[in-house]
C-alpha cells in the first residue's frame, strides 16, 4: 500500500494535478493591463493579452511574467484562446494603446511554442473576443456591430450570424463554444445571453447580466464575468446551470474583472485594472484569482 501511494503521489506531481496553486496570483509587468486570459496546458502557465501594448504574455503560477508575442501590428489585444498548438487573439484599436491604427480590427494567430505569427485576419466590427469549435474554426465577436464572424483555419472570413439582439452601444462581447454544438454570446449593454448557430440567434432563458464580458464553460457551469467598465453592471462572477440557465452562485469582485480561464487548478479570473487605464492612468499590477 505504501508503494502504491508513493507511485500515485509521484504521478500527480509529474502531471501537475497535485501542485499547490495559490488562490490569488499577484503579477506585475509595465502597464500591461490584460483584458483576456487563457490557459497554456503545454507549459502549465497562463496567457494574457494587453490592452496597452498589444502583446501576449506568459504568466506563471508564481506570478512571473514574460513575453510570448510582441512587436506586431496589434495595437491592443483582447480575448485569447489556445487551440491545437495555436494562440488566437482578438485585436484592435479602441484608443487605449501606446500607438494608434484607427479602424484596426482582427484576429491574430500565432504558434503556441514560439510565438511566431502565423496569420493576421481582418475582422469587421471591432474584434473583442474569440471562441474555437471542434474543427478549429474561430468565432469572433464585434461589439460595434450585430454580427458574429467565422474565421476558418485557412483564414477565410464570413458572417456566421447577424441579429439586432447582438447589437448595442457595446454589443456582442464574450463568447464561448458549447460542445453541444452552439455558441453562447453575451451582449455587454443589455446583459442578454444568446444561443447562436449558423444564421440563427435565440435568447437563452437566463437572467440579464448587464456588463457581461467574459464567458467560460466549466464543469460547474457557465461562468459569466460582469463589470461596470462600460455599463451599469456589477463587478461579479456568476455561475449558471447550463441545463436551466439559472444562477447557481454569484460572487462580488473587488476590482473590475474581465474574463476567466479554466485550468487544472480551478477557474481563474483576471483583473487587469482596466478602470485605471480607462480613466487615463496606468499601473503595473494585475491579478489572477480562483
Image: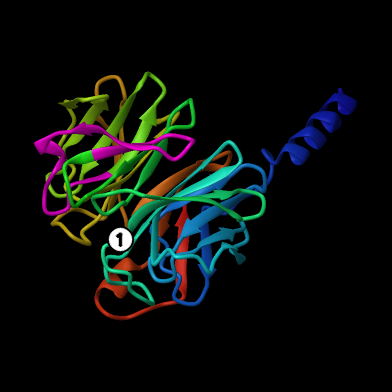
The residue at 16%/34% (across/down) is 207
Residue 36 percent coordinates (x, y): 41, 54
Residue extending furthest toward the right: 3
Residue extending furthest toward the bottom: 281
Residue 37 percent coordinates (x, y): 46, 52
Residue 134 percent coordinates (x, y): 48, 25
**Residue closest to the eye, 130 or 2:** 130
Q: Which residue is mark 1?
A: 256
**Residue closest to the eye, 147 or 269:** 147
- In the image, taking residue 231 as reference, residue 77 lies left or right, namely right
Image quarter of residue 248:
top left
How many labels were placed on the picture?
1
The residue at 62%/42% (across/down) is 41
> Does the magenta portion include 132?
no
Residue 14 visible somewhere in the drawing: yes
Span of residues in magenta: 148-173
The residue at 44%/40% (across/down) is 155
Image quarter of residue 283:
bottom left
**Quadrant in the picture for the N terminus:** top right
Residue 222 visible somewhere in the drawing: no
Q: Residues within 10 Å of mark 1 (few under 14, many from 20)?
A: many
Residue 14 percent coordinates (x, y): 77, 39
6 versus 66 height, above or below? above
- In the image, taking residue 276 as reference, residue 289 lies left or right, namely right
The residue at 69%/40% (across/down) is 18
Amino acid at each position: 500500500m505504501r508503494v502504491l501511494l508513493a507511485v500515485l503521489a509521484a504521478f500527480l506531481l509529474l502531471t501537475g494535478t497535485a501542485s499547490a496553486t495559490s488562490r490569488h496570483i499577484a503579477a506585475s509587468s509595465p502597464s500591461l493591463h490584460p483584458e483576456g486570459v487563457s490557459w497554456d496546458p503545454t507549459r502549465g502557465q497562463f496567457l494574457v493579452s494587453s490592452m496597452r501594448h498589444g502583446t501576449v504574455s506568459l504568466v506563471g503560477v508564481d506570478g512571473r511574467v514574460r513575453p510570448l508575442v510582441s512587436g506586431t501590428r496589434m495595437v491592443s489585444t483582447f480575448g485569447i484562446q489556445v487551440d491545437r498548438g495555436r494562440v488566437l487573439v482578438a485585436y484592435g484599436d479602441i484608443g487605449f494603446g501606446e500607438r494608434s491604427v484607427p479602424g484596426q480590427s482582427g484576429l491574430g494567430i500565432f504558434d503556441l511554442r514560439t510565438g511566431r505569427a502565423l496569420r493576421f485576419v481582418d475582422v469587421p466590427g471591432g474584434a473583442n473576443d474569440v471562441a474555437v469549435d471542434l474543427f478549429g474554426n474561430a468565432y469572433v465577436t464585434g461589439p460595434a456591430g450585430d454580427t458574429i464572424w467565422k474565421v476558418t483555419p485557412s483564414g477565410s472570413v464570413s458572417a456566421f450570424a447577424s441579429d439586432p439582439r447582438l447589437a448595442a452601444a457595446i454589443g456582442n462581447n464574450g463568447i464561448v463554444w458549447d460542445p453541444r454544438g452552439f455558441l453562447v454570446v453575451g451582449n455587454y449593454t443589455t446583459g442578454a445571453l444568446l444561443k447562436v448557430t449558423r444564421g440563427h440567434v435565440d435568447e437563452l432563458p437566463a437572467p440579464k447580466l448587464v456588463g457581461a464580458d467574459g464567458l467560460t464553460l466549466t464543469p460547474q457551469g457557465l461562468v459569466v464575468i460582469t463589470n461596470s467598465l462600460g455599463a451599469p453592471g456589477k463587478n461579479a462572477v456568476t455561475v449558471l446551470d447550463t441545463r436551466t440557465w439559472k444562477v447557481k452562485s454569484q460572487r462580488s469582485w473587488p476590482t473590475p474583472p474581465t474574463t476567466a480561464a479554466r485550468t487544472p487548478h480551478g477557474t481563474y479570473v483576471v483583473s487587469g485594472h482596466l478602470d485605471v487605464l480607462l480613466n487615463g492612468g496606468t499601473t503595473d499590477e494585475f491579478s489572477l484569482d480562483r
